[in-house]
Amino acid sequence: MNPDTLKSNTLLLLTAAIWGSAFVAQRVGMDHVGPFTFNGVRFALGSLSLVPLVVFNLRRRAKQRDAAPVSDRGTLFFGGAAAGVALYLGASLQQVGLVYTTAGKAGFITGLYVVIVPIMGLLWRQRPDLSTWLGAMMAAWGLYLLSITQGFSIAFGDFLVLVGAFFWAAHVHILARFSPLVDSVQLALCQFVACSVFSLITAAATETIALEGLRLAAVPIFYGGVCSVGVAYTLQVVAQRKAHPTHAAIILSLEAAFAALAGWVLLGETLSMRGMMGCGLMLAGMLLSQFQIRLDFLASPFRDGSDRPRPPG
């Protein structure tokens, strides 16, 4: 594994840990404010947390006369808006779903985008390697054990989070498309602003926004805004500059395991033996996706046909 890949995977794993623990903050925060209000304020806070970094980078480039390409405004705004819409839809469905399901379960269901990402990739004519497919299938089976009961039942909240997983998958692909073309921090800022605006508009139309509720939810909003949004989403944007979209999805799906752990420690949510098995399969799937060189080596003798056994004569 080359240094760039190792760095990207480490950043993605840290992102998954922050996101997983944020499920607890999201659930606790909604004891005091509505889901759209929570998302609108936390993404606004996340946007503000990035402004000093954006200004610092711009001043540094100006002083050093950095030769790095400047982000095209049209590409930046279009990519930020597209990512922001996907972020708004995924986060909204997840946040509303958390009203009706547990933090740990929502984390696991959200992780289903690990399978949706490579399926979407086929639409762009991407061809994931064998190890990626095997890792995704193993992670998906783990998510099945964690999310679906033996009676194949799924609650309303689980269904909302499941639909949201499709938008998280779209978000991964949008970032993979635009993050190499523009400044990562500026792209993160644009998507946060777009998501915040859409969320606050929805909150104004459907919820009652009260200062007392915001005060009581200040700590969860702060964690959700500064850590989950300002730090983790930015780490994702930076990491995906060097990461394959499907590999990124598999690593980020580990947020489900972190969500279950945080839910157990902080909220007393329990994890059955079946759930622990699912968590183990997810970890195995993530690790398997990183052994692509070995798997490709096993398959390579027959890839181009040059070493394929020939008929006698």
Image (tube, helix red, strand yellow):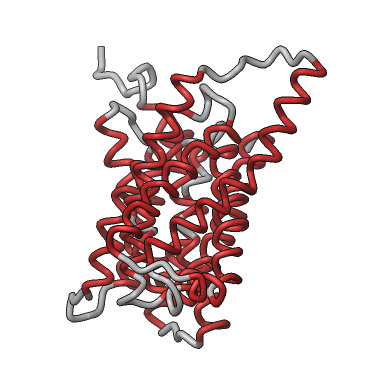
Query: Is residue 33 placed above or below 295 in the rendered structure?
Result: below
Q: Position of residue 59 (x, y in %)?
A: 76, 25
Q: Nearer the viewer, residue 245 or 2?
A: 245
Taking the image as shown, residue 187 lies to the left or right of residue 152, namely: right
Which quadrant is the N terminus positioned in?
top right
Q: Position of residue 260 (x, y in %)?
A: 48, 74
Residue at the image point whose x is 34% and y is 58% from the top: 204
Quadrant in the rendering for residue 177: top left
Q: Position of residue 26 (x, y in %)?
A: 47, 69
Query: Is residue 118 placed above or below 93 in the rendered structure?
Result: above
Taking the image as shown, residue 277 lies to the left or right of residue 24, namely: left
Residue at the image point whose x is 49% and y is 53% from the top: 252
Residue at the image point whose x is 25% and y is 31% from the top: 123
Residue sticking out furthest to the right = 63
Q: Position of residue 249 (x, y in %)?
A: 44, 47
Count of marks placed on residues: 0
Which quadrant is the C terminus positioned in?
top left
Residue at the image point whose x is 45% and y is 27% from the top: 77
Query: Is residue 90 placed above or below 304 in the rendered structure?
Result: below
Taking the image as shown, residue 21 lies to the left or right of residue 125, namely: right
